[in-house]
C-alpha cells in the first residue's frame, strides 16, 4: 500500500487521541462485530459521546475519503497465514465502509494464494497433497463477492448512492484498513471496467427525509443516523413541555430543527422522499385532564400529516406503540392480535393507526406502521423506568419501583429500533403493521439486577403501587418483520444497559 501511495488512516486508542485530531473521526470496535458499533464524530463533543455510548472496546480512526482497499488475511489458530484476498469496499455506514467486493484481478488472486506458508501436513483445511479441486467444499477459494459481515438489512439505496458518489469524487485519496503488514498484497489502484460503470451509475443524490419529533429520544437518534448516511434530513419538533425542554434541546444539538406544532402548522413536503412521523404525546399514565393534549398532539397532528402526505404522494413511516395491545390475549403477540388498549395514550395511538388505514383506503396514503416495544438507551425520556433507574444509580439516590417488579417487557435498544425504522421506509409494504421488539423478555427486577451488574452499584428500592394504565406484560411476535424486512433485534439487555448507564453516569459526573 505504501509503495502505491495508498494511505492508512491514523488510528488511536481512546486515551491517546491527540488534542487537535483531524475530524471527522470514526469510533469502531477493536475486535469483531462487523458493521456494528461504528459511529462518526464530527467534533470533540460527539467523540466523547460516542466513546461513552458504544458498549464495546473501541479504537478511534481518522476518516479518509475515496475508495477503500484492504487485504483480508485468513489464519489458522496458530496464527499461520492461509490465504490473503485483496478487497475494495463498496457500501457505507456513517462514512465507514462495511461491505466489500473481492478485486477480480487474477495476478493479485494468485499472489494471495501464494502468501500461504507451504507446510505440508500443517494446513488445517488442505490435505498434505496440496490444494483441493476448485469445487471442493473445503477449498478456500477467492469468492466473487464476500461480505465482511452479515447485516440485518441493507442501508437505504439513497444512502448507498450518496456514499458511492462521495467516494468516487475523492478517489484520488485511497483509504485502507489498518492490519498486519507481514502478508501485505500490493493492489493496483485501477478499477476494472465493471467497477467504473458501477461508480458512474452511483452518482445520484441522497434522499430528502422528514423526521418529526426529531428532538425526542428516538427521533434524535434517527435524524443523526440518516444524516450520517448522507441524507438531507428535515428535522421537526414542537418542543412541548411534557418533560424538560432543555433535554430536548440537548438531544437536538447538531440538528437544524424546525419548530412546528403539527396540529396547527403546515408541513412543507416539497421535494421530500419520505416522512418518519415520530412526533406525539408519550406516556401511558395519560388519564385525567391531560387527555385533551393526547387527542390534539397524537390524533389531530397525525391526521394533518397523513392528509398532507397523501396529497403529495410521500411515503410515511408511523411510530405506533405496543400500548395498542393492552393486556394482550396471547404472547408472544402477533400483529393480528385484537387491539385492546388500557390507557388513553394507547387509545390515541390505535386511533392514529385507524386514521392511517382510512387515508390509505380513501386517498392512497402509502404508510408503514411500527409498534415499538419499550425502547431504551441513551437520551431515553426522563420519566421512563430505565432512565430513572440509571440516574438513581449514578446519583446514589432511591429508585421508585411501581408494582411488584414482575411486570415484563421485551426491551428494545434504540439502535435496533432505528435500524427497523429505516428498513420500514425502504422495504415495508404499504398499509402493513410491524412489531419492533427486543429478542429477550425480562422483568423489571431482572433489569434492575442487570443494571446493578453493569454499574457495579446497588440500587435502593422504594416500592410504590402499580400505576394505572401500565400493562402487566408485553412480548412481541416478530416473525413478520424478520421475514419481510430482514430485521431482528441484536443488542442484548446487558449491552444496551451498559450503554445507557455510561451515558447517564457521564452526564451526572459533568453536572
Image (cartoon, rainbow, N blue to C red):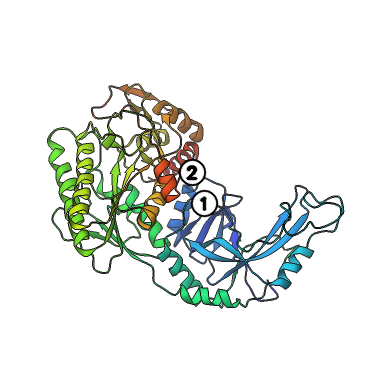
Is 99 positioned to the left or the right of 431 in the image?
A: right
Tag 1–tag 2 contact (CB < 8 Å) = yes
On the image, which quarter does residue 470 sit in?
A: top left
**CA gap, disc 1 and disc 2:** 10 Å
Q: Residues within 10 Å of mark 1 (few under 14, many from 20)?
A: some
Q: Please state, as top left, top right, bottom left or bottom right, where the C terminus lies in the image.
A: top left
- Image x and y of residue 107, in percent: 73, 72
281 or 475: which is nearer to us? 475
Residue placed at 67% from the left, 76% from the top?
4
- Image x and y of residue 73, in percent: 70, 58
Residue placed at 51% from the left, 52% from the top?
151
Residue linked to disc 2: 490
Lower sequence index among marks 1 and 2? 1
- Image x and y of residue 65, in percent: 52, 71
Q: In the drawing, what numbered circle is on residue 13?
A: none
Residue linked to disc 1: 36
349 or 214: which is nearer to us? 349
Amino acid at each position: 500500500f505504501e509503495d502505491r501511495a495508498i494511505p492508512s488512516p491514523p488510528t488511536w486508542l481512546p486515551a491517546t487521541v491527540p488534542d487537535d485530531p483531524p475530524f471527522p473521526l470514526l469510533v469502531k470496535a477493536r475486535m469483531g462485530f462487523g458493521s456494528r458499533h461504528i459511529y462518526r464524530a464530527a467534533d470533540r463533543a460527539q467523540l466523547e459521546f460516542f466513546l461513552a455510548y458504544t458498549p464495546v472496546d473501541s479504537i478511534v480512526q481518522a476518516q479518509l475519503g475515496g475508495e477503500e482497499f484492504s487485504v483480508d488475511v485468513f489464519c489458522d489458530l496458530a496464527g499461520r497465514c492461509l490465504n490473503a484476498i485483496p478487497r475494495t469496499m463498496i457500501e457505507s455506514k456513517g462514512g465507514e465502509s462495511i461491505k466489500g467486493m473481492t478485486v477480480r484481478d487474477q495476478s493479485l488472486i494468485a499472489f494471495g494464494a501464494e502468501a500461504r506458508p507451504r507446510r505440508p501436513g500443517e494446513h488445517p483445511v488442505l490435505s498434505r497433497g496440496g490444494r483441493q479441486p476448485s469445487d471442493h467444499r473445503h477449498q478456500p477459494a477467492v469468492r466473487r463477492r464476500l461480505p465482511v459481515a452479515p447485516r440485518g438489512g441493507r442501508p437505504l439505496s439513497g444512502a448507498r448512492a450518496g456514499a458511492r458518489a462521495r467516494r468516487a469524487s475523492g478517489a484520488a485519496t485511497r483509504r485502507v484498513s489498518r492490519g498486519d503488514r507481514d502478508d501485505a498484497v500490493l493492489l493496483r489502484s485501477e478499477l476494472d471496467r465493471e467497477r467504473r460503470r458501477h461508480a458512474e451509475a452511483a452518482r445520484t443524490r441522497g434522499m430528502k427525509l422528514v423526521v418529526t419529533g426529531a428532538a425526542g429520544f428516538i427521533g434524535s437518534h434517527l435524524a443523526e443516523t440518516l444524516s450520517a448516511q448522507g441524507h438531507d434530513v428535515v428535522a421537526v419538533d414542537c418542543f412541548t413541555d411534557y418533560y424538560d425542554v432543555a433535554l430536548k434541546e440537548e438531544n437536538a444539538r447538531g440538528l437544524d430543527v424546525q419548530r412546528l406544532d403539527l396540529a396547527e402548522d403546515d408541513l412543507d413536503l416539497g421535494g421530500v422522499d419520505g416522512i418518519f412521523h415520530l412526533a406525539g404525546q408519550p406516556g401511558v399514565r395519560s388519564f385525567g385532564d391531560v387527555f385533551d393534549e393526547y387527542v390534539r398532539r397524537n390524533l389531530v397532528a397525525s391526521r394533518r400529516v397523513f392528509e398532507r402526505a397523501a396529497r403529495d404522494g410521500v411515503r410515511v413511516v408511523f411510530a405506533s406503540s405496543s400500548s395498542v395491545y393492552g393486556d394482550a390475549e396471547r404472547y408472544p403477540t402477533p400483529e393480528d392480535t385484537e387491539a385492546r388498549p388500557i390507557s388513553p395514550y394507547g387509545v390515541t395511538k390505535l386511533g392514529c393507526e385507524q386514521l392511517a388505514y382510512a387515508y390509505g383506503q380513501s386517498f392512497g396514503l402509502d404508510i408503514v406502521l411500527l409498534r415499538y416495544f419499550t425502547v431504551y438507551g441513551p437520551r431515553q425520556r426522563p420519566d421512563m423506568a430505565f432512565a430513572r433507574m440509571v440516574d438513581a444509580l449514578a446519583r446514589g439516590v432511591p429508585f421508585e419501583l411501581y408494582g411488584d417488579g414482575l411486570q415484563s417487557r421485551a426491551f428494545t435498544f434504540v439502535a435496533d429500533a432505528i435500524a427497523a425504522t429505516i428498513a420500514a421506509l425502504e422495504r415495508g409494504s404499504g398499509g402493513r403493521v410491524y412489531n419492533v421488539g427486543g429478542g429477550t423478555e425480562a422483568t423489571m427486577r431482572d433489569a434492575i439486577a442487570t443494571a446493578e451488574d453493569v454499574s457495579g452499584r446497588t440500587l435502593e428500592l422504594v416500592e410504590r403501587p402499580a400505576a394505572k394504565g401500565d400493562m402487566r406484560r408485553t412480548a412481541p411476535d416478530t416473525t413478520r418483520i424478520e421475514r419481510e424486512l430482514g430485521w431482528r433485534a441484536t443488542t442484548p439487555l446487558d449491552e444496551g444497559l451498559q450503554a445507557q448507564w455510561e451515558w447517564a453516569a457521564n452526564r451526572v459526573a459533568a453536572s
